[in-house]
Amino acid sequence: MVEKVIVVVAEEKERLRRLKESLGLSEEEIRARFAAQMPDEEKRARGDWVIDNSGDLASTARQVEALWQELTLP
């Protein structure tokens, strides 16, 4: 269905913090959601490229820009 896959990951601690802040979920609710998803290592293994979204927005933006350049420049 697709030729390539870009996976975006973040450290579990950071994902927990973000979900508590943005959705107001409890840690128990968040962990239940994590348990229903594909394990992180499997996601990484299936991706052709991995963007680490654990840091600040500028760090993620640099990674996205570098990948964009790789994908669009001949």
Image: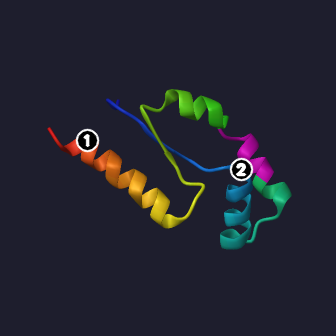
Give whichever of 34, 73 is nearer the camera: 73
* Label 1 environment density (alpha carbons within 10 Å; few <14, some 14–19, many ≥20): few
Residue 68 magenta-highlighted: no
Of the 4 image quadrants, the one containing the N terminus is top left
**Residue plotted at (34% across, 45% down):** 67
Residue under pointer 1: 71
| Left-right relation of 67 to 73 | right
Residue under pointer 2: 12
Looking at the rendered structure, the number of numbered marks drawn on it comes to: 2
**Residue plotted at (26% across, 41% down):** 71
| Left-right relation of 28 to 73 | right
| Left-right relation of 51 to 33 | left
> Most extreme residue toward the left, as rendered?
74
Residue 18, given in percent of the width and then of the height, sits at 67, 65
Of the 4 image quadrants, the one containing the C terminus is top left
Q: Secondary structure at mark 2?
A: helix
* Label 2 environment density (alpha carbons within 10 Å; few <14, some 14–19, many ≥20): few
Residue type highlighted by circle 2: Glu
Residue bounds of the magenta highlight: 31-37
Distance between mark 1 and mark 2 Cα atoms: 28 Å
Residue 37, given in percent of the width and then of the height, sits at 66, 40
**Residue plotted at (71% across, 50% down):** 12
9 vs 62: above or below: above
How has the structure been colored for display? rainbow
16 vs 9: above or below: below
Residue 43, given in percent of the width and then of the height, sits at 57, 34
Give whichever of 2, 56 is nearer the camera: 56
Residue 32 magenta-highlighted: yes
Instruction: Work out whether mark 1 precedes mark 2 in sequence or the reverse, and give the earlier one.
Output: 2
Residue type highlighted by circle 1: Leu
